Image (cartoon, helix red, strand yellow):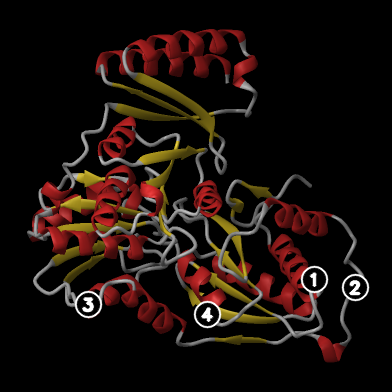
Amino acid sequence: MGKLFGTDGIRGLANEYPMLPEIAFKVGRACAYIFRNRDNARHKILIGKDTRLSGYMLETALASGICSMGADCVLVGPIPTPGIAFLTQSIRADAGVVISASHNPYYDNGIKIFSRDGFKLSDELEERIEQLCLGDEIANLRPLYKDIGKAHRIDDAAGRYISYLKTTFPKEYTLEGIKIVVDCANGAFYKIAPKVFEELGARVIAVGVNPDGENINEGCGALYPEHLSKHVLESGADLGIALDGDGDRVIFSDEKGNILNGDKILAILARHMLKLDRLKKKTLVATVMSNMALDEFMEDLGGKVIKVPVGDRNVVDALLKEELNLGGEQSGHIIALDYTTTGDGVIAALQVLHALILEDKPLSQLSNIIDPYPQIISSLTVKEKKDFTSIAEIKKIIEQAEDDLRKNKGRLNIRYSGTEPKIRIMVECKDEKVMWKWNDILKEAILRNL
């Protein structure tokens, strides 16, 4: 059997390796074993999921594994990934497990694990779980019948999370008079997000709130912002908010239908927090995919951007290491560390709405504070994830591209997806013709060789 964990938990086609119920059972046993052996107390592990059909199968297998190893299991049903991070801390669970493939189609699924402090597990702990799942170290360590774990459901988990989300918005303000389209991607936020905005006073038009097990992320949500723009324009809403299937990403539409990605959201929040003197060290964390215009914007404000490799966990690690409180990705993962330990689309949206109210401007004006450089990101399916820097033709073209882009105020980033058999090519340049030239040349070279 191959490696289980990728860049963001375990992920793959549902009912194929590694997303098999047999593997989920072993993951449950391994988690229970690791956390049960820390002391002599009885332990409990939380399980939540998004709206995928395969979630039922994997939830049952995980719960069986946890109980078979003597830990208790707490089931909360469909809850966004950030909700599991919050609830794990709130109910004092020893770990939280999310069954979700995030923004992927319904036929994929995944498993992410949070520790008791609400943060994703370290590489070392993931490696230990993988070792236990793929070996036979705990195969015969079965508690006696009287020590088998119990499983129960928390029926008000969504209500607890809704109450917390509302506390992240200042009590002295409401959303009255604001009309919002909320696209929940037929995912885990489908019941929760509309209620949060409604209870804070907004007039909400909810779309993507009819999950059927197969339509999660399908033509809607953060991956398809044109769906959001269409509804904003048709309804005359003040803005639109699109979440992804597990709720850790957010993308906006302004009242004119223009899309705001994570870079623009970070810019709005950074300036907002600087005005309130809440942005620690006048610094935010972004990934190498974020536009150079964001760096220039922060420099103009007397601040700076720390760049890290792609992945929200890398952003969180940098925030903790540097003692900062705002970071994110262009894709819409926004981590407001004052309120949450991971990307939370609704918390990020509430902070933007607070800025909107204080500025008393429409979102189109609030978001024009940065003018992104032309940028294109291409995704190509590959047969095998070879080291492309060792392929002579590709290496030569990369060197030529980087040299030319430097001269024209541009840059290049090529990387493999951590969750799909794809290679991502990002070309950014002030001169759009130069950008397109190198995008096309690189795509042709990669298609020939990979």
The C terminus lies in which quarter of the figure? Answer: top right
Q: Say which amino acid is labelled 4.
A: Ser
Residue displayed at 22% across by 53% down: 228
Q: Earlier in the sequence, mark 4 or mark 2?
A: 4
From the top left corner, tell me how far across and down residue 187 is, in percent.
40, 64
Q: Quadrant of residue 45?
A: bottom right
* Image mark for residue 33: 1
Q: Quadrant of residue 112?
A: bottom right
Q: Real-space Cα distance between discs 4 and 1?
A: 22 Å
Tell me, yes or no, whether the two marked residues, 1 and 2, touch with CB atoms within 8 Å.
yes
Residue 315 appears anywhere in the view: yes
Q: Which residue is mark 2?
A: 141
Q: Real-space Cα distance between discs 3 and 4?
A: 22 Å
Up the image or down, 204 lies above or below 312; here it is below
* Image mark for residue 200: 3
Q: Which residue is mark 4?
A: 90
Q: Earlier in the sequence, mark 1 or mark 3?
A: 1
Q: Nearer the viewer, mark 4 or mark 1?
A: 4
Q: Earlier in the sequence, mark 3 or mark 4?
A: 4
Left or right: 9 as drawn, with respect to 334: right
Q: Earlier in the sequence, mark 4 or mark 1?
A: 1
Out of 75 and 399, give the one closest to the viewer: 399
Residue displayed at 38% across by 56% down: 244
